[in-house]
Image (spheres, rainbow, N blue to C red):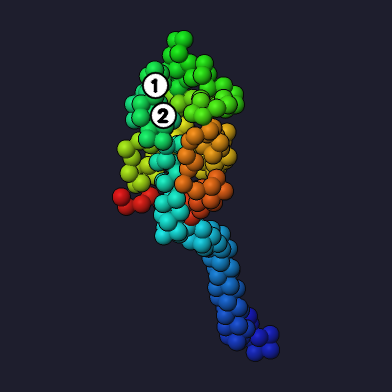
Amino acid sequence: MMQDPKNGKINFVSMKTATVLSVLLFVIAIGASAFRKDETPVKELTLSMINKDSVESVKAFETVYKVLMSSRCMNCHPAGDIPLQGDDSHLHAMAPKRGVEGKGVYAMKCSNCHQETNTPGLHTPPGNPEWHLPPAAMKMVFQGKSAHELAKQLVDKKQNGNKDIKKLIEHADDGLVLAGWNPGEGRTLPPVSHAEFKKAWLTWINKGAYAPKK
């Protein structure tokens, strides 16, 4: 509010102008603040929506499931404590036991027969430096699991060896996983190549790791 020095009257025009300017500046400040707060969440939400695709994820898991349920994978992920054997996934001859670490018990250790490389000859023991079953505390059973059950189990850190998404992605190139495509003479390979499996595995995870309904 200002007073005119010539006539001593209050200059209401100046007061009105000052009020309008104050209100305008306040509105601009509020608008700018709201924009800054909303920018990051909107960006994150958009990226999340782009990355996730339940249809594509579930479709990719169909390939993953076929591989994991093949004898090359399932034989080392049995429901019991005796590994499975052969293309028909029968109980392992000599009935070796899982043991606490998954490497056998007493003198009957997996490494007694399964050396660091495949033994030459038809149907001889396949080899790998890390040959073992999952440990007793975290059996990671594939045998008898539906696609829904297995998908849920694979992303459950309490059941998958405490693997987060990054470790699950890396697991596609684990030495024992790769051994499934180098099983030794006389054994059937998984239904798709490792490259196809890895592509499906990554798609399933990166698109949201959705579980099929059944």
Residue type at mark 1? Answer: Ala
Residue 91's place in the image compared with 152, above or below, is above
Q: Which residue is mark 2?
A: 85
The residue at the point 32 percent across, 44 percent down is: 146
Decide: few, some or many residues near mark 2? Use Cα within 10 Å; few <14, some 14-19, many ≥20: some
Q: Nearer the viewer, residue 153 or 52?
A: 153
Q: Earlier in the sequence, mark 1 or mark 2?
A: 2
Regarding residue 98, the answer to whether it shows in the image is yes
Q: Residue furthest front?
A: 122
When asked about the image quadrant of residue 143, the answer is: top left
Point 66% across, 86% down: residue: 4
For disc 1, the marked residue is 93
Question: Could you say where residue 136 lies in the image, as x and y percent from the top left?
Answer: 40, 23
Viewer-nearest residue: 16 or 141: 141
Residue 56, numbered label: none
Count of numbered circles in the view: 2
Query: Which picture quadrant has residue 5?
Result: bottom right
Classify the position of the N terminus by image quarter.
bottom right
167 relative to 143 in the view: left or right: right
The answer to whether the residues at label 1 and label 2 have Cβ atoms under 8 Å apart is: yes
Q: Which kind of residue does numbered mark 2 sit on?
A: Gln
* Looking at the image, residue 199 lies above or below residue 152: below
Residue 78: x %, y % from top left: 37, 30
- Distance Cα–Cα, label 1 vs label 2: 8 Å
Q: Nearer the viewer, residue 190 or 46?
A: 190
Tag 2's secondary structure?
strand
Q: Residue at x 32, y 37 (%)?
A: 144
What secondary structure is marked by label 1? loop
Is residue 129 visible in the rendered structure shown here?
A: no
Above or below residue 49? Residue 112 is above
